[in-house]
Image (cartoon, helix red, strand yellow):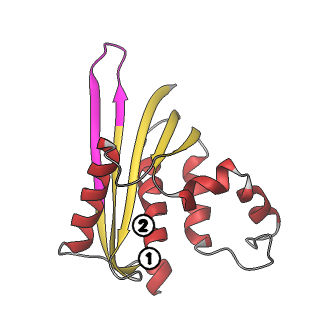
């Protein structure tokens, strides 16, 4: 399977407010040539956590065949449900957390799980705003998208 690095960050102004995500997909082919693709999108009204999830989802959905994917994000909101195995409990309890409260953003968690299905995904947390080049680039992509024009509706949040 192809080995892919996925870097992602999300942003929201005023949380909730205008938001965006930035994602970098990186793959080195068998000849040693590196391929990189940047993805970003802005939304009219959303939250930071939704954009953190959308960055990873969009990156995974862009992959055309099953891959081994290392996801790098500064969002513990995204990483901890997998590293701490919370996601299994949420699914088992019908998207209710251990405190018997509804899990926030179930539409995106479900979409993320579906996007992960064909892949072998490992999550890695990186410290944000700490000079990590790909995280800094993703942050720039996310904030530029949030501040840009042509923002679209986050139907799961606004709808």
62 shown above or below 147: above
User: Main structural element of the magenta stretch: helix, strand or loop?
Assistant: strand
Q: Nearer the viewer, residue 57 or 145?
A: 145
Q: Secondary structure at mark 2?
A: helix
Residue tagged 2: 51
Residue pictured at 58% horizontal, 39% vertical: 122
Residue 62 visible within the image: no
Location of residue 105 in the rendering, given as x and y in whole percent from the top left corner? 58, 73
Q: Is residue 88 left or right of residue 83?
A: right
Residue pictured at 79% horizontal, 61% vertical: 89
Q: Secondary structure at mark 1?
A: loop
**Range drawn in magenta:** 26-40
Residue tagged 1: 47
Label 2 with label 1: CB-CB less than 8 Å: yes
Residue extending furthest front?
Answer: 130
Residue pictured at 43% horizontal, 33% vertical: 4
């Amino acid at each position: 399977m192809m080995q892919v690095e996925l870097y992602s960050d999300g942003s929201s102004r005023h949380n909730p407010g205008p938001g965006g995500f930035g994602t970098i997909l990186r793959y080195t082919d068998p000849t040693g040539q590196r391929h990189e693709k940047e993805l970003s999108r802005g939304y009219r009204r959303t939250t930071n956590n939704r954009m953190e999830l959308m960055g990873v989802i969009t990156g995974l959905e862009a992959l055309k065949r099953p891959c081994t994917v290392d996801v790098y994000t500064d969002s513990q909101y995204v990483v901890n449900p997998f590293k701490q195995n919370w996601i299994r409990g949420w699914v088992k309890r019908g998207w209710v957390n251990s405190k018997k409260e509804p899990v926030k953003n179930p539409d995106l968690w479900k979409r993320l799980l579906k996007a992960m299905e064909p892949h072998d995904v490992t999550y890695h947390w990186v410290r944000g705003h700490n000079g990590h080049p790909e995280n800094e680039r993703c942050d720039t992509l996310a904030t530029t998208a949030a501040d840009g024009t042509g923002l679209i509706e986050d139907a799961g949040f606004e709808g």
